[in-house]
Image (cartoon, rainbow, N blue to C red):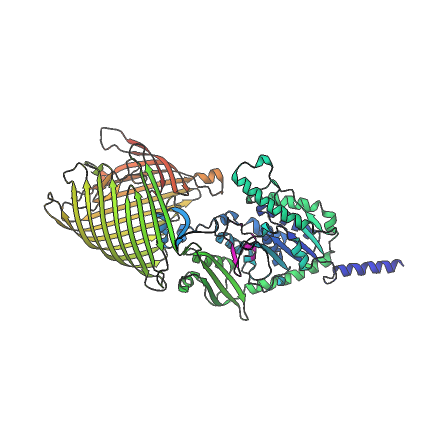
Amino acid sequence: MRYLLLLSLLLSLTAFADPQTRPKIGLVLGGGGAKGAAHIGILNVLENNNVPIDFIAGTSIGAYIGGLYALGYNADQIEDIMFNVDWDKGFSDFIPREDLQYADKQLRDEYNITLRLGYSDATLKTASGLLLGQSAFQLLKLSTGVVSEFESFDDLPIPYRAVAADIVTAETVVLNHGSLVQAMRASSTVPGVVEPTVIDGRQLVDGAIVNNMPVDVVKLMGADIIIAVDIGSPLLTQEEINLPIDVLDQLSNILTINTTKRQIDLLGEKDLLIRPDIGALSTSDFSQMSVAMALGKKSALENKHKIQSLSLDDKQYSQYTRDKNLKKEQWIKAASRPVVGIQYENDSDVAVEIIERQLGISVGDLVSKEKLDDAISRIYALDIFDTVNAEFIDANAGRILVIKTRAKSWGPNYLHFGFSWQGDFSSDSQVSLDIAYILTDITDNGGQWKNEVSLGWESLLATEFYQPLDTDHDYFSRARVQYRQEKYAPGRFTQNNSRPALTYHYGQFSLGLGNSYTDNGISEMGVLAEIGQMNFEDSAYDVLDYYSMGTYLSFGFDNLNSINFPTQGNKLSLDFYLRKDQYAHPFLDNTENSSLEINFDWRGAVGVRQHTFVGVTSLATVLSDDDFTIRASELGGFLNLSGYHKDEFIGAHKVFAAAVYQYDLGRSIFGNAGLPLYLGGSLEMGNVWGINDSVKIDELITSGSLFLGTDTSFGPAVFGVGSGVALDRNKGNDIRAFFSLGKNW
């Protein structure tokens, strides 16, 4: 009889080990942001106790970790992935300046307030989220790998589901096929913060608002026993609700807690609910992931007895693991196959040739996840798409790469804003507000019509038509009409020649042809005509009218990583203007003047850890046989002879150079939190000379500054002290305090 009992027991264990007859175990991973690292600790305990997982479903961060586990990654590998991802990058879709096209760099510099606004059909448009989700998507894709789309998520090593919500219908959407990364992304798209993820025409957001712990989904998949993990946040106490953001946070907690309660009611006696004690942790503080993981492991060990009741013996679990790894190897092997075709799903008016040029991937290439990420970044850096995605479809001979681009939801006509406020506590502040309205894709080849208005210290009214001349946008034409008024407070024409207040206003027309010879550079040549007037207050010249015609030739290169506080790169320009001017003033003997104006500007930066060294050079000259010209360059202001007022010096010839040191104080104080704060100093030398004066090195004016600056939503904010040698040699140095908000270059 004892032998019969032993034999029946062994047969029952064998039956439990058979995946066709043993109870199927489903794992449910709830949402909770950075607290989701607790899931890794729980997975570690399950693996150490030989618990097989047959189905897995998740919401938000649970969908992400669950997706990785379903792909065949084990707990240690998921830990390595999650702890080596810079999650803070997912909170910004800001395209690095050095990655932008040349023209887009100049546009961002001029219109330095970052807003996503458009105006079309008498309607003001904006993005439907504070973030577009592009950076977060690329982080998901990098950490997941170059996985092909799946006809069914049942084909994964572990059958998988992700839960999202349709923001239009409020319906629960269970994602069971297609792009695994898109499913992860949709399930974790925080409504109002990140733009909805569009899948099959539905606008999907974080599934936490409808089902934060999808027990019912795993039951429908066929699970007999369920292990559910709840990492949701508890309700705030009355003392913790002090700000409007706290009220919104509480509303979110109420939604998720109510959906979780309904799912808990579906659990039976044989099921296991694990609730790590992580209520004190933040959903957005990824620096605390190690704490969350430890607490998750601790909570699983507290349920070790029930977990061990689901265990397989070592031999059985090894077989389960081998079967899972075989399926994992299949998609890994598929990911190493070459590209046999490239398709474009382009939901925009942008020519496919533009996208193709930035892609940098050809048929026959082997594409790693890093290479694919670089390609996506290059396309996104065109700054004309809402989102850029790339997926693979398996084919007989390899894989088909599908590039998916979607136009900006607030386009195609955009509003841009710029702001500048500069002062030195001893003279009038200079404030300006800049507005641009740009209509894009007004021709088949991507023509643009830009209209600009500047109000404040300097005024501008301009309209410009930009037309690419080829499908690759290598060549372009530009026509521009503008009216500009520039003001100069009393200052100096030269070091020894005082200048009354001056107002300079003119209208100008220009027509040019150009070549974008790289993403970072352009050359342009054209013709221009100008009519204007100079007004001198309290001067014998009083009013000077003039008319001008000429040609120009310009070269530019720019890969500087920041216009405000650069740490790498160079920005340089070289311009030639050949003009013939005609003047109308009784005091001038010669009313006609031909001149060649040459301007050269360079700014370069080299950074070593927290230290950055910036060099600046600016040279200008006007070559003319006459003793009068209206063409002049300015000096004075922050990092432009910081010890003097803005544009205090005006002259036909200019020499200026500066050496700037800046220390990343923010990194020292806040670590890698991304809070910019710079402490810097500069040594500057320069001067201007009149049209008939000789440039003399011994007449260079020495100046310098100490400053503290940071980047804000309105551009750089700088406060500092500038010092300059007194122009009266009998006096000491001039010292002045200054401030600047917005563009100051």
In the rendered view, does 132 fall on the left or right side of 559? right
Q: Is residue 100 visible?
A: no
Q: Residue at x 73, y 53 (%)?
A: 310
Q: Nearer the viewer, residue 521 or 714?
A: 714
Q: Is residue 726 visible?
A: yes
Query: In the displayed image of the protein, which residue is found farthest to the right?
Result: 1
Q: Residue at x 41, y 42 (%)?
A: 711
Labels in figure, total? 0
Q: Nearer the viewer, residue 12 or 725?
A: 12
In the rendered view, does 418 fall on the left or right side of 323? left
Q: Residue at x 25, y 45 (%)?
A: 485
* Quadrant of res 412: bottom left
Q: Is residue 47 magenta?
A: no
Query: In the displayed image of the protein, which residue is found farthest to the front?
Result: 122
**Residue 182, percent across and down?**
54, 57
**Residue 356, percent across and down?**
42, 63
In the rendered view, does 189 fall on the left or right side of 546? right
Query: Considering only vertical position in the picture, is 285 above or below 5?
Result: above
Q: Nearer the viewer, residue 160 or 189?
A: 189
Q: Quadrant of the C terminus?
A: top left
**Residue 551, percent across and down?**
22, 56
In the rendered view, does 8 fall on the left or right side of 223? right
**Residue 286, percent across and down?**
55, 45
Q: Quadrant of the N terminus?
A: bottom right
Q: Which residues are magenta?
A: 183-204
